[in-house]
Amino acid sequence: MTAEKTAVSTHTVARQCTLCEAHCGILVTVDHDRVTRIEGDPDDVLSHGYICPKATALADLHHDPDRLRRPMRRVGDSFEEIDWDEAFALAGSRLRAVQRRHGRDAVAMYLGNPAAHSSSVLYGIALRVALLTRKFYSASSIDQFPQEFAAWKMFGSNVLMPIADVDRTDRLLILGANPAVSNGSVTTMPDARGRIAAIRRRGGSVVVVDPRRTETARLADEHVAVRPGGDPYLLLGMLHTIFADGIHQKPATVPLTGMDHLAELVAACTPEEMAPRAGVDADTIRRLARDHNSARSAVAYARIGVCHQVTGTLTHWLVNTLNAVTGNLDRPGGQMFSSPPIDVARLMRRLGSGYGMWSSRTGEYKSFRTELPVVGMADEMLGDAQGSVGPVRALVTYAGNLVLSTPQGGRLDEALDSLDFFVAVDMYLTETSRHADLILPPVSHLEREEFDFLFPVFSVRNNARFSARVFEPAAGALEDWQIMSRLTLEVLPLPFRTWSARPVRALLDRLSPLRLGALGVLTGPHGVLRRGRRGLTLGRIRRARGGIDLGPLQPRLRSLVSTRDRRVHVAPPEFVDETRRLVADAEIDYRDEEFDLRLIGRRHLRSNNSWLHNIPTMVKGRDRCTVLMHPDDAASRSLVHGQPVTVRSRIGSIVVPVEVSDEIRAGTVAVPHGWGHDEKGVGWFTAAAHPGANVNLLHDPAVTDTFTGNAAVNATMVNVAAKASAAIS
């Protein structure tokens, strides 16, 4: 009898872990209403059974008693539960009132990183359209704006960010990325460790350029400890060498334009001139260039560590250009573009970037892809230094923890408290949502069924995968897309909100992400409308255990490039001009006597921004929120491993333990972001017991990428000293 009950109650569901871009395939075993095991799915066509420790956290996220399950309304300094209809009515009336009184732009909206991991993001965009506000922000402006801007200028569209074809390359050059921990970003590569090992097994080579000997660098053939901010100088020296040696380029699949201007630009950028600025000796720069140029196939791949610099856009341009001039653009083993089941790049490439359509209140930041850089958000709420009220009086956030994830000069708490109304779509009472007047919690990850349409666009292999629901949502619980669609209806102006609410609501209930996904697959490059009976349908994808492998990446840039002349622009004039200014700057090192260390970021395998810090298995063990410091720097300050220290910049200070290790370059320190859970009123208690410190309190929001306003949080100048003992009263 017991065995029979067990057989009936225990079952396993195949889906993906959606906590990071890798979306690794997992098998979730459930006994009654509890997850008993999460393991890698060996049949998954992209991850092949690999998972990292984060995947197991999905069970704890689902069962977490701190996770909100009903709408919460602020009452004084606390919150009370209310029902969904009352919550939506409250949100709609308050948001409409703010826009009536102060105008459309008085309501701002922010989409956090987790939103992109669900097809529900479409409904977040629908809400933004309904609000008709120009005060729209997302995590992209603390993440990838430079990468998108470079793609726009070179290929004609910001969505045409190329992918590193790591599975077929003979040489992989990594700058500012740590895929052994992240499993790839804007190059989705589950089991990056295995993929790197495979490159070396087949006789290829891997080089990591990073101020820290990262987990990825430990797997590579070579680690180049570049000076923080030195990446563009390294690349300029490499390009100089390639042009000086004489380019023997493979025939391009798409014509390149601007080669003469590029050659003229790099002519003076000799390795000897660039070496002090890069922090890399001239011989190494020259060798890296020649090895890249002579490899049968090679690809340079850069990511968030490069984006987080004032030269982020320039560096991504130089990475793409290095690949292009060596004949490694749109070729197997180089930079390529996917053919996903829903061809987002083809659908969106003609939309334009929206660059400069409007500006921030101060005029300092221009819009890009119709949003503003998030570093200016606090100013839009608080106004100027004389105390005038800013234009933003209300805020909607979807899956974002701005207080911890953005540099705002310590002003964001005050700014959020100054709002007339704030509604947060969030699973937890976080450092940000604790300021909200209303919190709308979606169901857990395991209660959703998903068809991922975004990350296959950046996958290292074409694929289509379905993510099944593990648990049925509780009665009355809502998914993200249902919450966002209801909010969209509530902010519609009269008469639409009254006479069309019922039929439109019924229509939206039928237009679920899966129905939209099914339509996208049917009309996509692999769908039945193009491929006939053998083509894809969402039903076929749903039934395929582990998904459907659609084959390796294929050259296709010719059909995607969206510049007016249908050529790849390797020397956009504004990039050339800014590089000339950069190279002409006589100052090499901006250190001073007070702030003599450069601060960079750091990623941990068991951490994902601030998402997982309420999961005991993810925060157990040693303290991970530390300042990593070279032994020479520690010795010169009489600091010892584990000692509490104060890290101070011109903007603020934090206290963390020091971690002494020779894995980081001397003169450089590293602190991870996403910590700082010691604020009053938060509702995730495990996180509060392991608070760490908010590194964004050290970063100046005015220091940004030159072109995009993307937060530049790498190479912040700091000092580190022993924490002063408390005064004895």
Image (tube, grey):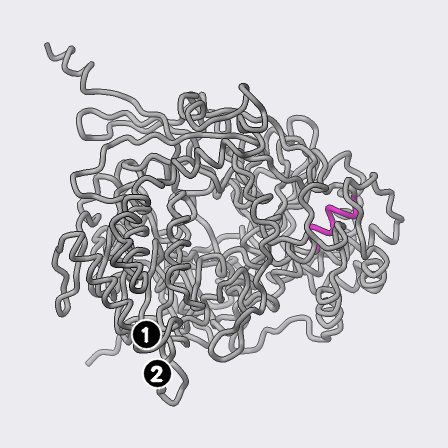
Residue 641 on image: x %, y %: 41, 56
Residue bounds of the magenta highlight: 318-326
Residue at image coords 45%, 68%: 134
Q: Are marks 2 and 1 in contact (CB under 8 Å)?
A: yes
Residue at image coords 25%, 53%: 428
Would residue 210 be seen by someone viewing this image from the given angle? no
Tell me the kind of residue under disc 2: Val
Would residue 566 be seen by someone viewing this image from the given angle? yes
Q: Nearer the viewer, residue 646 or 46?
A: 46
Q: Residues within 10 Å of mark 2 (few under 14, many from 20)?
A: some
Residue that badge 1 annotates: 393
The dominant secondary structure in magenta is helix
Q: Residues within 10 Å of mark 1 (few under 14, many from 20)?
A: many
Tell me the kind of residue under disc 1: Arg
Q: Is residue 416 left or right of residue 367?
A: left
Residue at image coords 27%, 42%: 444
Q: Quadrant of residue 290?
A: top right
Give the structural element (helix, strand or loop) at label 2. Answer: loop
Residue 391 on image: x %, y %: 38, 78
Residue 145 on image: x %, y %: 55, 58
Q: Nearer the viewer, residue 210 or 696?
A: 696
Residue furthest to the bottom: 386
Residue at image coords 37%, 45%: 120
In the displayed structure, would residue 537 be above or below residue 581?
Answer: above
Residue that badge 2 annotates: 389
Give the quadrant of the C terminus: bottom left
